[in-house]
Amino acid sequence: SSTQILLIEVPPSRGNQALHEASQKFNTELSRRCAARPRCQLIELSELAAPEGWLQPQYASSDGVHLSPAGYRILSSVLIQALHDSEQ
């Protein structure tokens, strides 16, 4: 099949260690599974993360889980670029 599959990582979170670890574990498994499929592309959200892996404060809403408007702008930009790249 020539269908391209785009998978997006779970964005990083801020302030909740258990959620942070669970999302990192999930993303690792997502990456492993995507790598095993020829037309699968994992969309990483590293632009949202600080060097230690937590969600950068300017991209976090007050709950530390959801993205702020600035975070959603970054997410939109990453998704648009991935969709554009997948069409080529």
Image (cartoon, rainbow, N blue to C red):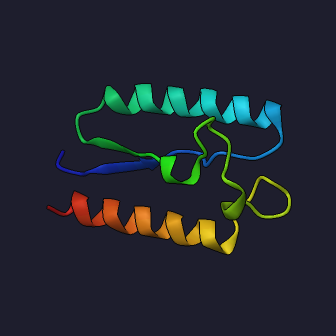
* 38 to the left or right of 14: left
Between residue 64 and residue 38, name the one nearer to us. Answer: 64
Location of the C terminus (image quadrant): bottom left
Q: Residue furthest left?
A: 88
Q: Which corner quadrant of the image does residue 84 belong to?
A: bottom left
Q: Position of residue 54 (x, y in %)?
A: 68, 42
Query: Can residue 45 be seen here?
Result: no
Q: Position of residue 53 (x, y in %)?
A: 62, 37
Query: Does residue 23 lie above or below 80 as drawn?
Result: above
Q: Position of residue 41 (x, y in %)?
A: 33, 44
Location of the N terminus (image quadrant): top left
Which residue is at 48% across, 69% downward? 76
Query: Can residue 32 be seen here?
Result: yes
Q: How many marks?
A: 0
Which residue is at 70% across, 68% downward? 68
Which residue is at 19% across, 63% downward? 87
Which residue is at 50% across, 53% downward? 47
* 77 to the left or right of 67: left
Query: Does residue 50 lie above or below 19 as drawn?
Result: below
Q: Which corner quadrant of the image does residue 27 belong to?
A: top right
Q: Position of residue 74 (x, y in %)?
A: 51, 66
